């Protein structure tokens, strides 16, 4: 038990260092210990930082940061991604925003590894629109943005268009 606790604390400290290095836009902040309630607290054992995912999302060889940030003033929150660069500040993109209607603690982030996935319309949740496909082939990691134990979507880098696209994976 003591060894497991030590390993957990080491992993938690390692993730804290990575989270502290994330550039957050003015007017926003990363969640703090005080914000760890609801689903974030319930599932913390599995993911100490459910509001943060780090991978090379655009395929340039540099790890990027996806994160849920909370408004400094008010109840709004947003999903951001920092496209990090070697020698300059990151390009910060806002992918989604909520006015606080949904508590941020209901939302989580993970990494969808490269591979082929059936989309929500491909699974039959609804008929695919002309701009939707039944399957999504990821060549680089994507951001898995989800409502705990419910719907999820992937934000993935479209190299041809040079920006992120969103595909619903479940409803």
Image (cartoon, rainbow, N blue to C red):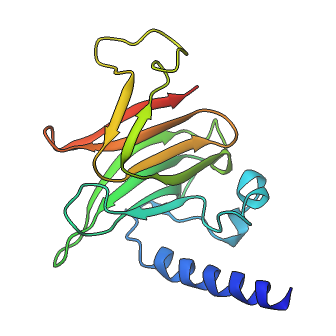
Q: Residue 17: in sight, yes or no?
A: yes
- The picture quadrant where one finds residue 57 is bottom left
Residue 91: name its quadrant.
bottom left
Report the front residue among 152 and 80: 152
Q: Position of residue 21 (x, y in %)?
A: 42, 78
Residue farthest along the left direction in this orientation? 160
Spot occupied by residue 146 in the image (x, y as percentages of width and height): 57, 42
Percent from the top left, x then y, of residue 12? 63, 79
149 lies above or below 170: below
Q: Which residue shows up at 25% across the image and 69% down it?
A: 62
Q: Is residue 22 above or below residue 97?
A: below
The residue lying toward the viewer, choosing from 95 and 140, is 140
Can residue 26 be spotted in the picture?
A: no
Using residue 160 as the reference point, say whether residue 59 is left or right of it: right
Residue placed furthest toward the front: 116
Q: What residue is rendered at 56% in x and 79% in y?
A: 16
Instruction: Please give the count of numbered marks on the rendered protein.
Output: 0
Q: Quadrant of the N terminus?
A: bottom right
Q: Quadrant of the C terminus?
A: top right
Is 67 in front, or is 43? 43
């Amino acid at each position: 038990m003591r060894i497991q606790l030590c390993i957990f604390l080491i992993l938690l400290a390692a993730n804290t260092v990575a989270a502290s290095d994330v550039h957050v836009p003015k007017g926003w902040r990363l969640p703090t210990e005080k914000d760890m309630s609801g689903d974030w607290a319930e599932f913390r054992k599995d993911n100490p930082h459910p509001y943060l995912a780090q991978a090379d999302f655009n395929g340039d060889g540099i790890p990027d940061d996806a994160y849920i940030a909370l408004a400094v003033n008010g109840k709004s929150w947003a999903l951001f991604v920092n496209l990090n660069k070697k020698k300059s500040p990151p390009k910060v993109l806002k992918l989604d925003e909520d006015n606080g209607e949904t508590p941020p603690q209901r939302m989580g982030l993970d990494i969808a590894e490269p591979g082929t996935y059936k989309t929500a319309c491909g699974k039959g949740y609804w008929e695919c629109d002309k701009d939707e496909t039944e399957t999504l082939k990821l060549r680089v990691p994507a951001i898995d943005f989800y409502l705990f134990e419910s719907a999820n979507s992937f934000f993935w880098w479209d190299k041809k268009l040079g920006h992120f696209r969103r595909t619903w994976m479940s409803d």
